[in-house]
């Protein structure tokens, strides 16, 4: 960042995040030209409208938050499959605190955030003290949290009739942007600083690259790991509140399957599933690339005629992820393939 | 009378990169003999085994088995030629039964064949009976003791028709009684015409068991003798042999206050017991001993990786608890570990990040990274320790072994420690970097640091240390003065009674 000599621009332009940015721009331009039409009354509709852009942003906030929660987790070479379920549980608890407990919205929200942190703390405790693999622990809590949410609501109760002032968070705009986008951007900035500018971020990378190496360097490996999972729980709870505000209802199935979208976004954003390498801005680009793809497809006349937006977006998101992974390992694989071919 | 020897090695050379592990070894093994192989750590015993078992190909030299020259030996062809190796840690499947393990080794038919359980069990029972082992073929290997597992390995070797059996420190983890059982089996094997190559650090076993002994030193065989013609002193002389030829920087420091004092320190989990010693400021205390003597284990106790469960650890006169590496770092104890690629540096991270990893709190106040300060600190150490690298941003993995070691050292010097523990600091390091590291260590001691230097390199530990602690069996066996006779150090490490054998 200071006088290190000239930057290697070629390397910078070829970095994963930059490649992803090109893809995102290309995607956006394609949908802008192919997905924007004028209707009979001469009004522009489809992808190219500002409303649609805000819609994309609004719909990305919850998965985006989960992706932000997962970035530090995956940087430690861990995984958290329970964030989507925890989102559902926290949404239910928030609704219950407010509706059945008679608490005010801010108090209920604070309690829900606390419950998210406790949920993350459960993951953390099992992973650090019992040394169980994160994949298995969070697979367990994935079912546990969802099951709790369903038990609390008997699978039937939906909390609705939230006050207007609360729905403002999820359905209105503030200072030009959807209200929740401000929260999302705030969390994004905070996580970015945490990962890229603090010793916390530095140590979780070291843990991700080499947990033993980090231990031998005197880093508090268990404390750092614990914090990462607690933070993930906290952010999942925040996503739950935003989700509730956007839909105006808290249901036990809130956020089902979101963890997989979030993991996809993180990995697409260049964070190595083996830990250590990755960035928060990469994750944000990954979230954007998926969101634009999903919404843009829904605007394409062809897709609309076939009524296949969901299917197409699933298919293309998967293809995009596999393509990104393939491209990112090519520089490593190619030199090892060539000599083999000569030998064979 | 001499038929062709079972195994004949001639001028065997094996290089690893630039390191000459074997430099022209000759070795003969006759049918029905127990031939002991002796040597210090790193003398080339393991390499020799790897070459004979086909794990590594030699660079030069010939291998002749029962009169037939063989080339391009692979593990599979070695087994087919009747070569079997029994390691200290048996490589059996713990969840399968004895019969299944033996079956897996010996049955060669295709994967889709039906298992003949009866034949499998009968074969296992016959083989076990042949070596006089009272082990049920249906026992799960997990439930067997270590020597019983070794017996199963021997049964496998027999079943495979092994003519050459290599045993690599088979008694290291055995009790006296188990040893005798194993010896009986080895004698039985040799009586039946099998040639046994027997590797051990315990000299008394060699006198007990072997017919001939070959001593390796620095990758060369320094002589094969009938065991009857040798005694402990002459064996030790052969093993140590060389002069302390290298020039070590002289000790210039006067030892100051006691930095670290241990009183009967032990850790059951890692086998360290009853260690009492003192390290003074400005002193280099060498720790010599054979592999498995408990030196690294003691270092791990002092660094809080495996906390002590007995005794007292005093730093600067105050009793301290070391429950974790963080405790150790907070108290000013630094540990440069033996395995630098796994523990010493994070290979994927830049040199600068590696160097500041143990001083996050001090350098980055308020947990806020200060890249400028980090960079200048890294540049300073790179210059100070003469680290050869592309710059502070180069990843640790891009460096050579010696330079990685310097980065690992810099990380701990940055903590401004009171006590520095160096674990095999020059292992696998080229000669130039080695003498540079020696100079750095000497300078640090002169500046008043207490240093514990763990080294299996006998000349190094003797040349560098102000006092030499010799460890064995998890405890401190002796403390010898500086410039002690290598034979005395080796004798203490081996635990023989003849101190100062030469």
Image: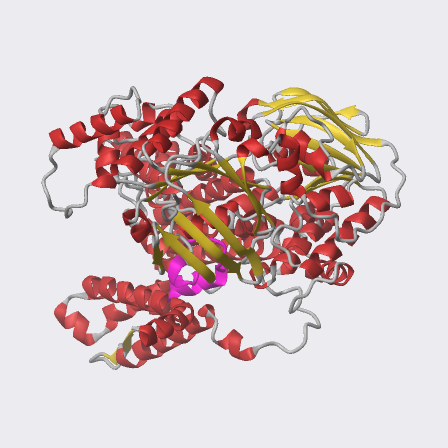
Note whether B480 is above or below A259 in the view shown.
Answer: above
Q: Quadrant of residue B272?
A: top right
Q: Residue furthest top?
A: B177
B3 or B57: nearer the viewer:
B3
Residue in view at x 59 percent, y 40 percent: A220
Q: Position of residue B448 (x, y in %)?
A: 85, 42
Residue in view at x 53 percent, y 25 percent: B269
B462 or A92: nearer the viewer:
B462
Residue A82 visible in the displayed image = yes
Q: Position of residue A264 (x, y in %)?
A: 34, 57
Query: Taking A281 as reference, is B450 left or right?
Result: right
Note whether A238 is above or below A289 in the view shown.
Answer: above
Question: Can residue A269 be found in the magenta stretch?
Answer: yes
Q: Position of residue A319 (x, y in %)?
A: 27, 66
Query: Taking B55 as reference, is A317 left or right?
Result: left
Look at the image and give the residue range highlighted in magenta: A266-289
Residue in view at x 39 percent, y 59 percent: A267
Question: Can residue B332 be found in the magenta stretch?
Answer: no
Q: How is the image coloured?
A: secondary structure
Residue in view at x 51 percent, y 49 percent: A210
Query: Taking A64 as reference, is B253 left or right?
Result: right
Note whether A17 is above or below B397 in the view shown.
Answer: below
Q: Position of residue B202 (x, y in %)?
A: 55, 30
């Amino acid at each position: 960042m200071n006088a290190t000599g000239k930057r290697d621009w070629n390397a910078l332009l070829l970095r994963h995040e930059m490649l992803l940015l090109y893809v995102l721009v290309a995607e956006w331009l394609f949908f802008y030209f192919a997905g924007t039409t004028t209707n009979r009354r001469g009004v522009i509709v489809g992808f190219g409208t500002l409303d649609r852009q805000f819609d994309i942003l609004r719909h990305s906030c919850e998965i985006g938050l989960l992706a932000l929660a997962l970035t530090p987790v995956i940087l430690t070479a861990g995984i958290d499959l329970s964030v989507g379920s925890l989102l559902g549980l926290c949404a239910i608890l928030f609704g219950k605190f407010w509706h059945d407990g008679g608490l005010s919205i801010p108090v209920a929200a604070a309690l829900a955030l606390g419950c998210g942190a406790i949920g993350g703390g459960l993951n953390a405790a099992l992973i650090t003290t019992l040394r169980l693999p994160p994949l298995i622990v969070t697979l367990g809590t994935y079912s546990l949290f969802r099951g709790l949410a369903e038990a609390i609501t008997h699978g039937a109760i939906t909390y609705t009739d939230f006050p207007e002032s609360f729905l403002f968070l999820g359905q209105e705009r503030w200072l030009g942007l959807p209200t929740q986008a401000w929260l999302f951007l705030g969390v994004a900035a905070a996580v970015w600083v945490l990962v890229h500018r603090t010793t916390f971020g530095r140590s979780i990378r070291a843990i991700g690259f080499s947990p033993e190496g980090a231990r031998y360097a005197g880093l508090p490996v268990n404390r750092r790991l614990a914090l990462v999972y607690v933070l993930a729980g906290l952010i999942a709870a925040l996503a739950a509140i935003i989700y509730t505000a956007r839909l105006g209802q808290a249901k036990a199935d809130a956020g089902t399957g979101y963890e997989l979208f979030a993991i996809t976004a993180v990995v697409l954003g260049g964070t190595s599933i083996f830990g250590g390498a990755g960035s928060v801005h990469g994750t944000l680009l990954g979230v954007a690339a998926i969101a634009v793809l999903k919404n843009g497809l829904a605007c394409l006349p062809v897709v609309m005629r076939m009524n296949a937006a969901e299917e197409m977006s699933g298919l293309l998101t998967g293809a995009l992820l596999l393509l990104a992974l393939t491209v990112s390992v090519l520089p490593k694989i190619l030199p090892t393939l060539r000599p083999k071919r000569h030998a064979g | 009378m001499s038929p062709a020897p079972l195994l004949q090695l001639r001028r065997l050379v094996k290089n690893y990169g630039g390191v000459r592990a074997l430099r022209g070894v000759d070795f003969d093994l006759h049918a029905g003999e127990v031939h002991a192989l002796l040597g210090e750590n790193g003398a080339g015993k393991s390499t020799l085994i790897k070459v004979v078992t086909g794990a590594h190909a030699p660079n030069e030299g010939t291998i002749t088995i029962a009169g037939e020259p063989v080339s391009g030996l692979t593990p599979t062809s070695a087994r087919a030629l009747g070569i079997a190796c029994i390691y200290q840690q048996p490589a059996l499947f713990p969840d399968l039964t004895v019969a299944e393990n033996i079956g897996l080794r010996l049955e060669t038919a295709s994967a889709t064949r039906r298992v003949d359980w009866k034949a499998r069990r009968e074969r296992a029972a016959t083989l076990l009976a042949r070596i006089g082992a009272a082990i049920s073929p249906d026992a799960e290997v997990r439930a067997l003791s270590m020597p019983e597992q070794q017996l199963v390995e021997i049964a496998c070797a027999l079943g495979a028709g092994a003519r050459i059996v290599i045993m690599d420190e088979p008694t290291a983890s055995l009790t006296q009684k188990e040893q005798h059982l194993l010896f009986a089996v080895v004698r039985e094997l040799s009586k039946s015409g099998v040639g046994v190559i027997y590797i051990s650090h315990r000299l008394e076993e060699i006198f007990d068991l072997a017919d001939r002994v070959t001593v390796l030193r620095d990758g060369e065989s320094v002589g094969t003798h009938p065991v009857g013609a040798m005694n402990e002193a002459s064996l030790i002389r052969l093993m140590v042999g060389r002069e302390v030829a290298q020039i070590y920087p002289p000790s210039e420091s006067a030892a100051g206050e006691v930095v670290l004092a241990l009183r009967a320190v032990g850790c059951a989990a890692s086998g360290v017991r009853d260690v009492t010693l003192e390290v003074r400021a400005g002193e280099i205390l060498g720790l010599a001993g054979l592999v498995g003597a408990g030196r690294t284990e003691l270092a791990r106790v002092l660094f809080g990786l495996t906390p002590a469960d007995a005794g007292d650890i005093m730093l600067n006169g105050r009793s301290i608890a070391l429950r974790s590496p963080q405790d150790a770092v907070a108290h000013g104890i630094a540990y440069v570990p033996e395995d630098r690629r796994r523990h010493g540096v994070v290979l994927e991270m830049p040199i600068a990040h590696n160097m500041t990893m143990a001083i996050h709190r001090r350098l980055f106040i308020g947990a806020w990274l200060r890249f400028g300060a980090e960079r200048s600190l890294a540049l300073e150490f790179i210059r100070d320790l003469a680290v050869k690298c592309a710059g502070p941003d180069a990843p640790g993995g891009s460096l050579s072994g010696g330079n990685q070691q310097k980065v690992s050292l810099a990380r701990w010097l940055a903590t401004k420690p009171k006590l520095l523990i160096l674990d095999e600091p020059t292992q696998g390091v080229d000669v130039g970097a080695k003498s540079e590291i020696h100079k750095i260590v000497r300078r640090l001691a002169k500046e008043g640091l207490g240093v514990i230097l763990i080294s299996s390199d006998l000349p190094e530990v003797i040349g560098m240390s102000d006092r030499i602690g010799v460890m064995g069996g998890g405890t401190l066996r002796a403390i010898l003065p500086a410039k002690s006779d290598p034979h005395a150090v080796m004798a203490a490490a081996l635990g023989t009674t003849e101190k100062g054998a030469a």
